[in-house]
Amino acid sequence: MFRRAWYLYLEDGGFLSILEYVTLKFLIEQLALTQANSLNFIMVLYRFSYADALLSWFDDNARNLPWREKIGEKADPYRVWVSEIMLQQTTVAAVIPYFNSFMARWPSVHELSRAPLDEILHAWQGLGYYSRARNLHQCAKYICEHLKGIFPSHEETLCKLPGIGPYTAAAIVAIAYGQKATPIDTNVERVVTRIHALKTPLPKAKREIKALAKMMTPDRRPGDYAQAIMDLGAGVCRPRAPNCGFCPLKDNCLAFKSGEPTLLPHRLPKNARLTRHGTVFWTARKDAAVLVRRRAERGLLGGMMEFPSTPWVVSPVPEIRKHEPFPGDWQPLPGEVAHIFSHFRLVLRVVSAVVEQDNCDNGQWCMPDDFGKLALPTVMKKVALHVSKVAAVFPRSDTLLSVERN
């Protein structure tokens, strides 16, 4: 670990030249440092060699993002928290309009805690991973009811709140409170892996990456450093086309010295994505109102609205009569609806029927023109669009047309 952390053994291709190594050894001997203090002295130099160069680069090249304050200004924990939750599994470009909309609608944790969950889920449509929105709401309510609206400043306490894990907790502590912490996302993993030329494949390398990332984190400006290394990974140390010539750390990067930085990080082969199947019941009244229902609070798309369907299973296709919302003359519509989730592919067929029932214990009737008011996930919008194209069940609405354009 000593050799990998500080590269004092020259045969490992480390960052110290022979002259630097001799000079460092001389300083340690002259200062009469103990072994423990020598280790600490080397660590300080190690951090400085990366942090100083990276922070200087960040001062000139920091991204202008709506949740960031200007360099040197205090960040708002609420804005940092919302942005980091939104950025999980989502690109910066996709998050920006959602973040701006959230801040305009709920500018503080107090406003967010008082908002109905349906409104938050509706505003979250298109970001995916809807459990994040539910946890956001639960966390806001807890902070206001039990912590007087103040975000904790310690990682351990933050990790006890709904939806906040080690990465988000470290980001809040470092960026909002200026305390030393090391948030590690995929960008940071890639930068650290390439700098140290780690051969262990992900995800097995995560523990080693975490240890090295913590060693690299400086005591000075930890929040700026956290954002700097994220920016470096996002804009310079890219997965497929790294701009090594523009990287402030290239002189100390073993992957750059190898000439093949894109070979890192190594990853274990992913398991093939499963395909699940289901049947959606497009249940319409004579006035064209359609039956919708709320999904269970826990689980995939929890708390969102949907058109009734069978369970989504790998095989075989479920018997639809066990799951039809009303007895009816269910007719299959041509074609299928496909949607990709993070861990499986979903293929839905649609059957439709016109029913005379007005009352329903497990759902509500909604006119197609009002679909835009519902917290419908993207897969259900696809179903509605599919029906609008292949069946004369209801007139095309502005909502469906907007779905098609997106």
Image (cartoon, grey):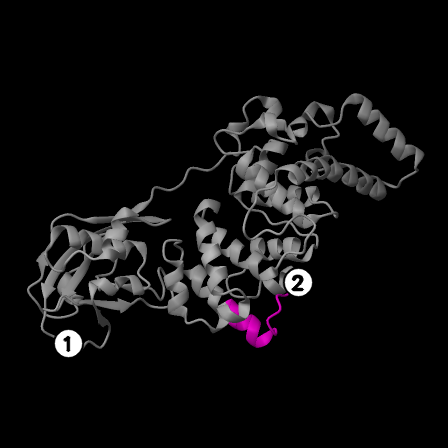
The mark that comes first in sequence, 2 or 1, is 2
Q: Which residue is mark 2?
A: 153
Report if the CB atoms under discs 2 and 1 are less than 8 Å apart. no
Residue 348 location, x and y as percent? 21, 52
303 displayed left or right of 237:
left
Q: Is residue 150 magenta?
A: yes
Residue 127 location, x and y as percent? 40, 53
71 displayed left or right of 369:
right
Q: Secondary structure at mark 2?
A: loop
Nearer to the camera, 67 or 277: 67
Up the image or down, 2 lies above or below 120; here it is above
Q: Which residue is mark 1?
A: 358
Task: Tell me the residue at 53%/39% (across/down).
Answer: 234
State which quadrant residue 391 falls in.
Answer: bottom left
133 displayed left or right of 244:
left
Magenta span of residues: 139-153
Residue 199 location, x and y as percent? 56, 32
Q: Is residue 195 magenta?
A: no
Viewer-nearest of discs 2 and 1: 1
Nearer to the camera, 185 or 305: 305
345 displayed left or right of 83:
left
Per the model, the C-alpha gap separating discs 2 and 1 is 53 Å
Up the image or down, 327 lies above or below 279; here it is below
